Image (spheres, grey):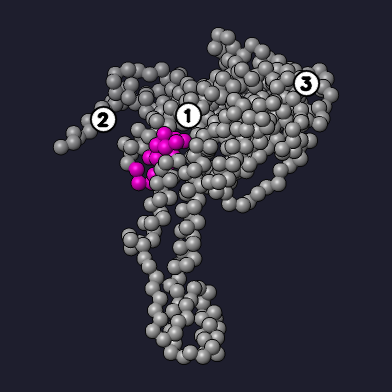
Amino acid sequence: MSKKRRHNRRPAIQQPQAQAEKKSNYLSSLLVPQEISIHAKSINDYKIAVALALDNSNPDRSPLGALYDNLLLDNHVASVIDSRILYSQRSPFKMIDDKGNENEELSWLLERSWFEELIRLVLFSKFQGTTLLELYETNAEGELATTTEIPQSHFNATKGLILKEPGATNGWQYKEGIFKNYYVQIGKDRDLGILERLAPMILAKKIGWGAWMDFIDKYGVPPLFITTDREDNSRLQQLYSSAMAFKSNSFLIGRGNEKFEVGSTHTGNSKDTFDVFIERANDEISKRILGGSSLTDQKTFVGSAQIQYRLAEDRYNADKIFFKNIFNSFIRPRLINLSPIYAPLQNHYFEWDNSEVRTADGVADLVVKLSQAGYVPDPEFVEQETGIKLLGLKENTIVKPQPEAEKKK
């Protein structure tokens, strides 16, 4: 995969004659932050969060946002989502005119941190559902300074309101009026995203982790059993104190013929009881996000991984098309309205650069293959592509054909 192209010089884009009056009091700075909850989430929390988010009279996404934050603490979930988003973030792009010609100056204008964040937030809307972005703050040069996400808890998509604090019934209109050109809603009003479908599986996995930790806490170190024929309480107290000082683990003290037994799992291996379940949960999560589990399975075969990549590539390409449409339809007009520096975008459009980027090694291999086939490559082209100065061809140089690979018996 080729890296995004970087321009070595700053193009001569005309700067605005006078810096417009600096905007202040953009809405994201006026919001009252929501308290962060670190409590464990349950299936009941999931049901309540979905019900509140889809409430017809006054939807509230605060519990849903807290639930999604908790789900993203799962390393596997966060990793496969990153895999989807990073593919687009690392793909080359260009700004083109109506004839398909690239404008490198405008392409350079998008090579900024705010644009990287824009790609991430637009694509993440597929996972968290309705997402609201703020394109407001500019720097001294008139360029957009940052892409800001309005938290899920602080907007009501059905009413088109940005809320000062979670649960408020009044707020600022962002779909119309003076703020319309600075806020972009990604997704439909009642869209809850892929995480809503994955939540039961992820929560079940968390329960599995908790059960495993509880099992380790109870049985990781064998329990201590003490049996005595003494019936007096003073002796029992002595044994209790000794057991407490012996080790920090479970212990039982019995009298006479009392016996204690600890049951075992039917598999005879506690790891199989929990680890297999967690692996299955990870596989199901990978299938939903990447189309399969081969890309995240360390034991997968090369052939399976190649097939899996083709399945994942369909999702990668769909993500790129989704972002391109969002940018050209909603982001580009707002950038043009935001600052004169983006005025040239009026007649240009965003497009992913799918042209293949040749490396010096690749060109050298291609030259060898063409020479073996009897063709004579252009030395000027080879010098330009590889950066190696060609002084000529050695006399009596014969390019030997490569031997054919042995056929498999």
Instruction: Look at the picture and state if 268 lies above or below 47.
Output: below
Quarter of the image where one finds residue 109? top right
Marks 2/1: CA–CA distance: 37 Å
- Assign a secondary structure to mark 2: loop
Marks 3/1: CA–CA distance: 36 Å
Quarter of the image where one finds residue 287? top left
The residue segment tinted magenta is: 286-300
Q: Is residue 111 visible?
A: no
Q: What residue does disc 2 label? A: 402
Q: Nearer the viewer, mark 2 or mark 1?
A: 1
Label 3 vs 1, first from the N-terminus: 3
- What's under tag 2, amino acid-wise? Gln
- Assign a secondary structure to mark 1: helix
**Mark 3 burial class by Cα count in 10 Å: few <14, some 14-19, many 20+:** few
Quarter of the image where one finds residue 97? top right
Marks 2/3: CA–CA distance: 70 Å
Label 2 vs 1, first from the N-terminus: 1
Image coordinates for residue 354, horizontal then vertical, percent: 48, 22
- What's under tag 3, amino acid-wise? Ile
- What's under tag 1, amino acid-wise? Tyr
Q: How many marks?
A: 3
